[in-house]
Each structure stands twice: as structure tokens, then as C-alpha cells.
């Protein structure tokens, strides 16, 4: 037993920290808006609704099926914790490709901390953290490829990551380019061999999306799938910078960032070809710049976007623990300053850590613990309980506001496709929502005050067909059908 503990000391300490850091996330209330949307769509899937056609969000589909599997915040977070276990193990194996075991262990421990704490929302079941497992394993297959078949597997894994979150496409683009770059001196002699590898990588990447294409075609929902999961993302990329969902992707500065990315790759290629920097640091630097481009696709300052660049950033920093020539160290330091510059320029915000853990491990009052996640957590729980007690499982409800957790907690579906008010506004879904509302008047309507978001048609329906049931927090209105 002592020999086992001594031999596996690193993994015991690592997973003990992992457990302690992740445990509070399993007991958080329904408070995070995006998780509320994922769980509501997951509920719709479990109840037989067709994704995108009958219930809507604008992300690729795999995340919603994971939410359907998780069912609750606890289940969803538990699923994330289980996914993170192989993520940690495979990241360690990826580190061994670049470093000796001692440095690989340090790198892995840093990954555990950054992807578990609230600082960049590592505790939240978002797409960015789910997608790093298939991404890391895909990179591992790519770097250790001994057969052409391994490139196909690498592509499939990255394609799976793409069906969780779209920015992975830039990483597969990088790997295709790297196939030719890493053997550039013999490009003429090996061109068709390298081309075949790139072809297999690309085909593999397309396979998961093609499976979904056939699946939604079978469900007669191909157009909603293409529109919601893929095409709507182009307008989404520019909507933060331009303030509208109708702008083109290029209007948000995406083209300028792409040009900067390609220029940075060109400079890195030049430095590698002149043997100024090592091939390994070149690879990781290429990867890091690709993920930075992915992080900035929409220029939104959400901290969970930064999770995508955590693996290559840790790898690059870890080279500082190895013997390197001055040019390599200079590039690493310059890259770190660039990452800091990006974070400052786009005003990324972060969540507190110490307060989060003190609230969980030291708090004795459940009410104050719940309130620490926001003033509406307790209100939403009360409203959800009211609805669940006074409706049947098949009854529909409607929430006018950005509080999708009410659907998830009450286990009731919305009357239309949209789960939050900002989706109705952003995608101009007023008419569709009112038509669904009229066709199947919901038993309850939860109305959150939003003076800057008028919905006159809804107000008229409430006046004609509903009576006020209760008022929560002096402003949240709950209407019941007469």
C-alpha cells in the first residue's frame, strides 16, 4: 500500500486538489444563464422535441445532448467533472510529447487549477471546457501519428470538438498547414504523401458534422439545423462589436484579426525555417495564436472563452522550465505579453476565487449561500416551485425575460422555440413567439420587468386572457391563465 501511494503520489495529490476545487460546483444553484438554456434544450430533447426546429439556440448540437444527459445543474456539472478526468490524463500525455515527466506534471497541475476554479468559469458546464478533451486527444493523435489512419482519427476528434463549439475550425486549419510546414524542406518529394494526410485530417473533421447533417435531414429539420447551428453564427460573430445580429461577420473586425493571425504564422514559419526558434515551440506558438483567434471570434469578453487557449498557453509557459536558447525564451515572453494585451484590450472580466470557496466550505446559512450567486436565485426557485405544483408535466409556460432556469427547474417547456427574451429580440422572433403563444396558451407566464424591451402583443394577451397570480421581489409578475 505504501509503495502504491509513493509511486502514485502525483496523481493522488492532483486528483485530491481536483476533487476539492470541483466539489463546490456540484452544489451551485441554478444561476448561470447559458446553463439554463442548455438544460432547457436538453429537457426539450428528452421530451421528444426536435432541436433547432422546435426549440432553439445557436450553438452546435453536441452540448445540448450532453445537457439532456445531465438533466439538472448537479448532473450537468457531475458530467463535466467526469469528462475532465480523462482531459487531465490526456493532457499529461500530451505534455510528455514536449517535456520530461517532472515538467509535464507541473503543467498538468496548472491545467487542473485553471480549468476547475471560477476565475475563467472552469466550474461552469460551458462548451469551451467540454471541447478541450476531444481537442487534446486529437492533437495527441496528430503529434504521435505513425500511420495515415491516425490523421483521420485526429480529424474526427477535432470534428467532434467542432460540434461542441465552432472556433475549433481554426485549429484544424492550423494542423492542415502544419502538415506541410513541418516537412517543408522535402515538400516537392513528399507533396502527395503530405496532401493525403491533410486530406484524411480534413475528411475526419467533416465526419461528425456530416453525421449530424444526415440525422437532421432524417428528422426533416436540416434547414433549421444549418440556419441555427451554423449560419446564424456568422452574424453572431459581429453582433457584439456592431450591436446588431444583421451585420456581416467581416464588419466586426474579423478579417483584420485573420490577417494578423496569418502574418503571425508567416513570421513564426520564417523563424523556424531559419532555425531561430525550435520546431516544438513553433508548433505550440502556432497553436496558441490559433486559439487566440478563436477566443476573439466574437470579441465578447466572457472569461470562459479563454479556456480554449489554456492548453497551448500552459505548454508554452512550461518551456521556461526547460533549457532553451534566448530566442525561444524571448518568443515565449513576447507571447505572454501579447496574451495580457489581448485580455486588457477586450476587457475580459474574471470571477473571484477565494470568496467562492469560503462561501461553500465555511458558510453555515444556506439562504446566504444561495444569495451569493445573485439576488434572483431564491426568487426563481420559488417561482419554479409554484409552477411545478400547479401544472402538469405536459403543460407549457412562458418566461418573458432572460431567466431560462425557470423552465429547467420547473421541468416545463416554453410555448415556442425561444427560451430567453434576448433570443426573441436578436432573431426577430416576435411573430413566431406570439403565434405559438396563441396556438397553445400557457398556463403560467412569468414576466420580468424590462422597460427597454417592450412586447406590446404579449401585454395585450396578458390583459385579455390572464390574471395576476403573485408578485415576487416587488417586480416579477406571475400570471395565470383564467
Image (cartoon, rainbow, N blue to C red):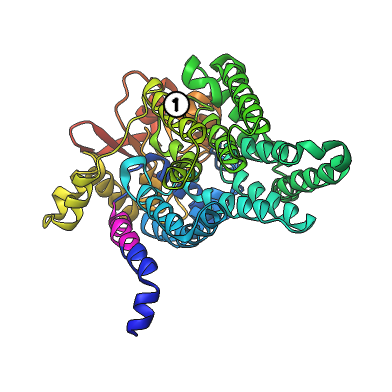
Q: Position of residue 151 (x, y in %)?
A: 73, 52
Q: Is residue 450 left or right of residue 59?
A: left
Q: Looking at the image, is 454 positioned above or below residue 279?
A: above
The residue stretch that appears in magenta: 17-28
Q: Identify the residue at image location x=61%, y=48%.
A: 50
Please indicate, yes or no, whether residue 76 appears anywhere in the rendered image. no
Can residue 420 be seen? yes
In the rendered structure, the answer to whether residue 297 lies left or right of residue 478 reads right
Q: Is residue 25 magenta?
A: yes
Q: For the C terminus, which image quadrant? A: top left
Disc 1 secondary structure class: helix
Give the main secondary structure, helix, strand or loop, of the magenta stretch. Answer: helix
User: Where residue 8 appears, x then y in whole percent?
Assistant: 39, 73
Q: Position of residue 132 (x, y in %)?
A: 52, 49
Q: Residue at x 43, y 35 (%)?
A: 420
Between 400 and 159, the residue placed more toward the observer is: 159
Amino acid at each position: 500500500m505504501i509503495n502504491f501511494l509513493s509511486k502514485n503520489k502525483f496523481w493522488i495529490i492532483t486528483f485530491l486538489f481536483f476533487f476539492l476545487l470541483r466539489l463546490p460546483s456540484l452544489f451551485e444553484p441554478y444561476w448561470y444563464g447559458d446553463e439554463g438554456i442548455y438544460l432547457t434544450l436538453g429537457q426539450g430533447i428528452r421530451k421528444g422535441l426536435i432541436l433547432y426546429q422546435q426549440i432553439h439556440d445557436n450553438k452546435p448540437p453536441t452540448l445540448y445532448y450532453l445537457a439532456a444527459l445531465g438533466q439538472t445543474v448537479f448532473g450537468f456539472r457531475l458530467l463535466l467533472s467526469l469528462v475532465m478526468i480523462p482531459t487531465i490524463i490526456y493532457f499529461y500525455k500530451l505534455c510528455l510529447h514536449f517535456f520530461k515527466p517532472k515538467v509535464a506534471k507541473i503543467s498538468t497541475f496548472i491545467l487542473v487549477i485553471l480549468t476547475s476554479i471560477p476565475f475563467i468559469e472552469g466550474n461552469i458546464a460551458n462548451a469551451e471546457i467540454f471541447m478541450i478533451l476531444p481537442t487534446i486527444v486529437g492533437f495527441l493523435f496528430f503529434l504521435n501519428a505513425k500511420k495515415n489512419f491516425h490523421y483521420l482519427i485526429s480529424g474526427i476528434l477535432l470534428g467532434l470538438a467542432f460540434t461542441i463549439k465552432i472556433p475549433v475550425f481554426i485549429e484544424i486549419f492550423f494542423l492542415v498547414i502544419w502538415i506541410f510546414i513541418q516537412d517543408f524542406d522535402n515538400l516537392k518529394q513528399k507533396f502527395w504523401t503530405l496532401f493525403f494526410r491533410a486530406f484524411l485530417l480534413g475528411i475526419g473533421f467533416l465526419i461528425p458534422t456530416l453525421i449530424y447533417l444526415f440525422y437532421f435531414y432524417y428528422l426533416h429539420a436540416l434547414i433549421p439545423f444549418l440556419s441555427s447551428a451554423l449560419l446564424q453564427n456568422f452574424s453572431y460573430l459581429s453582433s457584439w462589436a456592431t450591436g446588431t445580429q444583421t451585420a456581416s461577420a467581416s464588419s466586426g473586425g474579423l478579417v483584420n484579426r485573420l490577417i494578423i493571425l496569418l502574418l503571425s504564422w508567416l513570421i513564426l514559419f520564417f523563424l523556424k525555417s531559419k532555425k531561430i526558434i525550435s520546431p516544438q515551440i513553433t508548433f505550440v506558438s502556432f497553436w496558441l495564436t490559433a486559439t487566440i483567434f478563436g477566443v476573439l471570434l466574437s470579441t465578447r469578453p466572457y472569461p470562459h472563452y479563454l479556456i480554449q487557449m489554456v492548453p497551448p498557453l500552459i505548454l508554452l509557459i512550461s518551456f521556461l522550465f526547460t533549457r532553451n536558447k534566448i530566442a525561444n525564451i524571448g518568443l515565449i515572453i513576447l507571447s505572454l505579453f501579447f496574451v495580457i494585451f489581448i485580455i486588457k484590450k477586450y476587457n475580459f472580466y474574471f470571477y473571484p476565487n477565494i470568496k467562492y470557496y469560503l462561501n461553500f466550505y465555511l458558510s453555515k446559512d444556506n439562504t446566504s449561500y444561495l444569495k451569493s450567486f445573485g439576488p434572483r436565485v431564491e426568487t426563481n426557485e420559488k417561482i419554479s416551485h409554484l409552477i411545478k405544483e400547479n401544472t402538469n408535466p405536459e403543460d407549457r409556460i412562458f418566461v418573458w425575460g432572460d431567466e431560462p432556469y425557470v423552465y429547467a427547474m420547473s421541468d416545463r417547456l416554453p410555448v415556442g422555440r425561444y427560451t430567453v427574451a434576448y433570443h426573441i429580440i436578436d432573431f426577430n422572433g416576435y411573430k413566431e413567439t406570439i403565434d405559438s403563444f396563441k396556438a397553445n396558451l400557457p398556463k403560467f407566464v412569468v414576466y420580468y420587468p424590462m422597460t427597454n424591451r417592450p412586447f406590446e402583443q404579449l401585454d395585450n394577451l396578458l390583459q385579455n386572457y390572464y390574471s395576476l397570480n403573485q408578485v415576487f421581489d416587488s417586480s416579477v409578475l406571475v400570471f395565470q391563465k383564467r
